Image: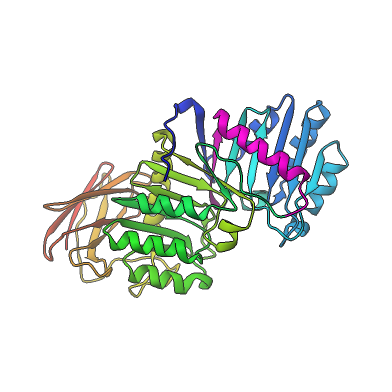
Amino acid sequence: MTPAAAVTPSTWSLVTEPGDGMQPIYSLMSSARHELDMTMYELADPEAVDILEADARRGVTVRVILDQDYSGAYVNSTAYSELGSNGVEVHWAPAGTIFHQKTVTVDDHTSAIMTLNLTSEYYSSTRDFAVVTTDRSDVAAIEQTFATDWTSSGSPEPGPRATNLVWSPGAEVPIVDLIESAKHTLLVENEEMDDPDIAGALEAAAGRGVDVELVMTYSSSWAGELDALVAAGVKVGTYASDASLYIHAKVIVADGTTAFVGSQNFSEASLDYNRELGVLTSDPALVGPVARTVGSDFAGASRFGGGVVPGGAPSPPLSTTTTATPTGGPWCRASASPANDGYAGDYDVYVESDEPDQKATASDAGDTYSYYTNGTGYAVIYLWNTSAGESIKVTVGGAVCSTVA
């Protein structure tokens, strides 16, 4: 795999949804002076449509490609009609192929590469990311592909090479390469899991000792794949389909140093046939926040397998010892149980606290590991080479507690 290029922090910025809200994307769209190009799988956001029309009224050349395959024609028909009646040049993507890319480019200078659709009803409940870049080669490649897609009447071609971009068709190889490059840890979020090569690469990574953590919204469609991943040693966390957070992001973080963020689901169609776009980056200013968010999402999810009901609320076993700090100050409670991942000495440490969004650290005699608590102060921390009966100390923000393996 070609490593992601080293870049200056000014080249990139990150938008994390739902926490950051849509204003950063709206502001980018409103900043256009000469040209705005958009490729969008779903556009059902009246405010975004208003901005595109306002740009056109200001003399900006606004061009929009909307998906029409699958549910695209139904979802996008209102926006297509309104934009076309108000000065925006709008094209349907070619029939018979899915354009799942979600990209906005302004003035040949700045591109937002997103995991999210511009569908307002989902903004408050979906985990999504947008990477905003001013990298010249990447923006030029995005615009080159847009120009090709704008006039195309057939299936999309692989996008041009650029330092940090991952295009579909053709995304499977670089994504598998990224997974195979991991030596210590993999953090993964995705909406789908039915590509055998991706699943196989994750299983192989766990088999060679990489700590692989996957978080998804549970669907019975992927139950067989999730069972196989757990059997191979992958740690899988799931949210119920009606939970307040829906995992829509498509993310991989390898060894805490390289991140993929994009539109690609882990399906054969998404990787090898659709028009999709993702980005690879080694910029710590992006990789760190993405890793913390995915780690927090995993900590708040239910553990899949080992008798845990998919999407149900995780709870510590009754047989473990739990201690907490005295009342009157920050508090935490902890318990531990074998991880049931096939590896002796692997333990799950369950942490409850009044310290939301704080670093939680579990330590035994030979191992220390940390995760961030979720919005309710909950986290699951994983320790290795822990012995039954060994003491485990937990710190969460200003709280300290302990338990016994």
In this view, which residue lies farthest toward the right?
A: 85
At x 70%, y 58%, the residue is 97
**Left or right: 103 in relation to 303:** right
- Asked where in the image residue 8 lies, by quadrant, the reply is top left
Image x and y of residue 323, in percent: 19, 57
Image x and y of residue 238, in percent: 44, 63
At x 43%, y 42%, the residue is 2
**Left or right: 101 in relation to 83:** left
Q: How is the image coloured?
A: rainbow
Q: Is residue 117 visible?
A: yes
Q: Is residue 296 visible?
A: no
Instruction: Determine if the magenta segment contains residue 383.
Output: no
| Front residue of 267 and 363 | 267
Image x and y of residue 51, in percent: 74, 35
Where 203 sits versus 42, above or below?
below
Image x and y of residue 132, in percent: 56, 35
Instruction: Determine if the magenta segment contains residue 151.
Output: yes
At x 45%, y 61%, the residue is 198
- Asked where in the image residue 87 lies, by quadrant, the reply is top right
Where 241 sits versus 365, above or below?
below
In the image, the segment drawn in magenta is: 126-154
On-image quarter of the C terminus: bottom left
